[in-house]
Image: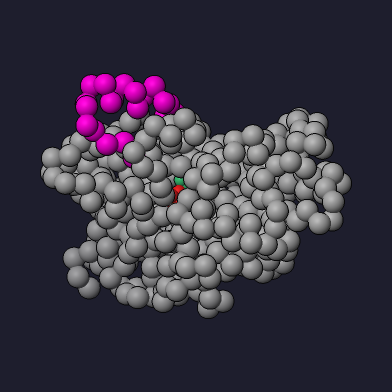
Amino acid sequence: MNDVGAKLRPIMQYDVLPTLEDYERFSEEHLIERIRFHKQRAGSDLVILGHHYQRPKITQLSDYVGDSYGLSEKAAHSPGKQIVFCGVRFMAESAAILCKPTQSVYHPDPDAGCPMADMANIDQVKKAWSTIHQWLDKSQKVIPVTYMNSTADLKAFCGERDGIVCTSSNAEKIYKWAYERGEKIFFFPDEHLGRNTGKKLEIPLEKMILWDPKKVDGGLTKEEVRQAKVILWAGHCPVHMEFKARDIKHVRKFFPGCKVVVHPECEKEVVDLADASGSTEFIVKYVGELPPKSTVFVGTEVNLVTRLQQMFSDRRVFKLQRSLCLTMYQINLSNLCYTLEHLENLEKVELNLDIKLNAKIALDRMLALN
Ligand code: 13P
Ligand code: SF4
């Protein structure tokens, strides 16, 4: 046994398995050593996937780091028998839907959800769908499109109704796909990504209407729905709502010539003022392609901005605002190490079979487009 293996011995001697609280008492250095040891021991059987918003200590230990789209592709093609997903719940669920039956997915904190994904539930969406269809003629086909940041039953809803999943990296392509098949798009749960994508495709703002599930009939009239090209769900990401148009005006005043890149979950006014917008992977590439010494302000989750500052130290990379995704931050070295050392006793990410099959249809449609 090597040094780290020897250090593991004390914990293996517990009469009962150590609890998560035991791991929380370990130093960061010790947890990192243990995680590296397990990775080395498991070899290609174990794959750790980490989203760009994970803290740098987690991305350093991940085998693949990427945006929601890239990680879903990795989950679909990864060779590992065990996939440990460091991200939020909808991401781990999507990996469990896309992986092979011989693979298992684990989530270091099953309570780490996405507040935006929780802004649309299946009953609300079914009710809206039914009302919208009472108001339309049979010839007016609506294609349901769910953002990846949604619960698995909403992906299944789309799979069952000729619909599809999109991510921030392919939303334009998905809109085009949908318009080849229908007259209108019903997009949930992020109104901002939905509107920003529609704007890129030059859909007039008045043709993008907002369905608010808290209001009677979504707060809309039959005529508005009949005229619409996109029916947007009133949902948002609290992390990206922190970035405001005034922040961009402010930095442009004090740093003339600076670049601004933001995530398309930001409000339209913010995306309109930025030099560029795109998925987390797009943002990494955008900053990476700027010439050395450039100044760039980044409007997305703070852990990614911190990592960009480390990756591109010859550029001046600043946060547009400090905005932390608390649920992404729930994944840490303690629960990752605990997960790796308790795999046999932990619950895998599992879904109802019908939901899984129908959600896979919608996800596969998206993956097939690349
Ligand atoms: P990406 O698909 O761009 O990685 O975004 C995921 C996300 O949760 C953004 O808030
Ligand atoms: Fe959800 Fe926003 Fe966090 Fe992304 S950043 S996981 S959309 S709350």
Question: Which residue sits at x=42%, y=61%?
Answer: 70
- Depth check, front residue: 169 or 105: 169
Q: Please provide percent x and percent y for residue 166.
A: 55, 56
As drawn, is 56 to the left or to the right of 98?
A: left
**Is residue 23 placed above or below 6 in the rendered structure?**
above
Question: Which residue sits at x=45%, y=70%?
Answer: 82
Q: Please provide percent x and percent y for residue 234.
A: 64, 36
Q: Residue 117's image quarter?
A: top right
Examine the rendering and report whether any part of residue 289 can be seen.
Answer: yes
Q: Say if the magenta span includes residue 20.
A: no
Total of numbered circles in the picture? Answer: 0
Q: Residue 116's image quarter?
A: top right
Q: How is the image coloured?
A: one colour
Question: Which residue sits at x=46%, y=59%?
Answer: 69
Examine the rendering and report whether any part of residue 356 can be seen.
Answer: no
**Is residue 5 placed above or below 331 in the rendered structure?**
below
Q: Please provide percent x and percent y for residue 342.
A: 45, 62
Q: Please provide percent x and percent y for residue 165.
A: 59, 58
Give the magenta-colored segment's residue range: 242-261
Question: Which residue sits at x=28%, y=25%?
Answer: 251
- Depth check, front residue: 116 or 187: 187
| The N terminus sits in image quarter | bottom left
